[in-house]
Image (tube, rainbow, N blue to C red):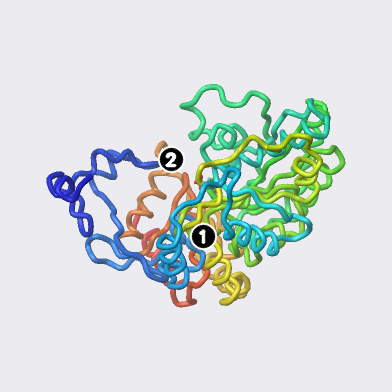
Amino acid sequence: MSPSAFSSANIDLGTGPNDLEPHWMPFTANRQFKNAPRLLVEAKDMHYTSTDGRKILDGTAGMWCVNAGHGRQSIVEAVQRQVATMDYAPGFQMGHPMSFALAAKLASMMPGDLDHVFFTNSGSEAVDTALKIALAYHHATGAATRRILIGRARGYHGVGFGGLSVGGMAPNKRQFGNLLGAVDHLQHTHSLDHNAFSRGQPTWGAHLADELDTLAELHGSHNIAAVIVEPMAGSTGVLIPPAGYLERLREICSRHGILLIFDEVITGFGRLGASFACERFDVIPDIVTCAKGLTNATVPMGGVIVRKGIYDTLINNSDQPIELFHGYTYSGHPLACAAGLATLELYRSEGLFERAGELEAYWEEGAHDLRGAPHVIDVRNMGLVAGIELEPRPNEPTARAFEIFLKCYEDGVLIRTTADTIALSPPLVIERSQIDTIFSTIRHCLEKVA
Ligand SMILES: Cc1ncc(COP(=O)(O)O)c(C=O)c1O
């Protein structure tokens, strides 16, 4: 669109677009939003600025992704430099040095022998890539019967057909008919009866991993390719893994030759006070997906990190010149790599993962202070994440939480809600006084709604 077309469409780019209709917004109540839009125009450190000039404290790191805070100079400059130097380079049969540097840096942050990286442009693409790598791996080892993919109820793995199929959030699936056929699901680990108001990992629920043994028996373990779980489920409303659960899943997968995939799109890059959840829980999966915090969300990018044995099997032992027929035009895009390298350096130089760990106890106190506030039926937390579950209004599920979201926004704090749970995940640079502001604003809003 030329500048004159913008003005003829009556769109003021900076301060207040008037024609909202053509943009079909993602995961949004479009009609409701367009009647009362909430538009952000600037972001710096812990705050957004809205079109009406208000400062909004970011309690969600955008969408679990701006881990170093907004508008960080070193990342901005790295992207600016890169776009001026080389805007794009083809990634098939060609390369550029930065994608190799970023892969090496990312691999060096990972525990165990998770040491090879495939780049994508989003979490959804990372998940679909991981599932395809798992299937291709078994194909390469001659275990061609291993085709079944196991996810978990309430899991969120993005919106590609693969991720949707192994995902377990019903509203995301019900409009799309048949997804992948060879899929089954473990049950989720959430239980208010056993675990309400747990601090950190709940003590009840490790045995739920044993359901994988049952599925292995049911389908035949020689038919199962992989299990994918979020080590801490975020988008479904913050479900912290019960103590011992992930360890048990690992043991059962190893026993049956099933690959274990951790979807760390949310838990990667310090969210739980360690580089990745697999480091925090000391459970090494075979494949890790990541995105979001990889570039501090400045340029879209995702990645799949695999253990050495998977790379060796698929690449070094291949008899084909092109070993994996998979990739994206923008895999390892130069701007994303520049952003990623600057971001990982910032995380290191400012010790942000450690900082998240140091703040965890203060954050936990703030979150659990909401126990007893109106409508609160559970508080869950780990690292710099909290889930505050509200009693749904009779016959009006999700409405109360959404009203709290709107009221907090009016009061200058950005939160997220998923169904009837408030999900909080601020940038890791948050100050204690800002933690206080987030929880006191939520309390105040809880007291105001029916
Ligand atoms: C665990 C998990 N996997 C995958 C995704 C999808 O990522 P994207 O929205 O970048 O496609 C998300 C997004 O929130 C996620 O939380």
Judge by depth and name the residue closer to the eye, 348 or 418. 348
- Residue that label 2 marks: 397
Q: Determine whether 97 is above or below 395 in the image.
A: below
Q: Determine whether 54 is above or below 153 in the image.
A: below
Quarter where residue 35 is shown: top left
Return the x and y of residue 357 as percentages of the image width and height: 63, 71
Q: Which mark is residue 344?
A: none
Q: Residue at x 59, y 32 (%)?
A: 165
Question: Looking at the picture, which amino acid does disc 1 mark?
Answer: Thr
Judge by depth and name the residue closer to the eye, 370 or 217. 217
Return the x and y of residue 428 as percentages of the image width and height: 53, 69
Q: Residue at x 56, y 73 (%)?
A: 362
Lateral position of residue 415 relative to residue 130, left or right: left
Instruction: Please rate how many residues cluster around mark 2, counting C-alpha atoms within 10 Å: few if below 14, some from 14 to 19, many from 20.
Output: few
Quarter where residue 433 is shown: bottom left
Q: Secondary structure at mark 2?
A: loop
Question: Looking at the picture, which amino acid does disc 2 mark?
Answer: Pro
Lateral position of residue 5 relative to residue 195, left or right: left
Mark 1 → mark 2, Cα distance in angstroms: 35 Å
In the picture, which quadrant includes the N terminus? top left
Return the x and y of residue 195 as percentages of the image width and height: 66, 53
Residues marked 1 and 2 touching at CB (< 8 Å): no
Q: Which mark is residue 295?
A: 1
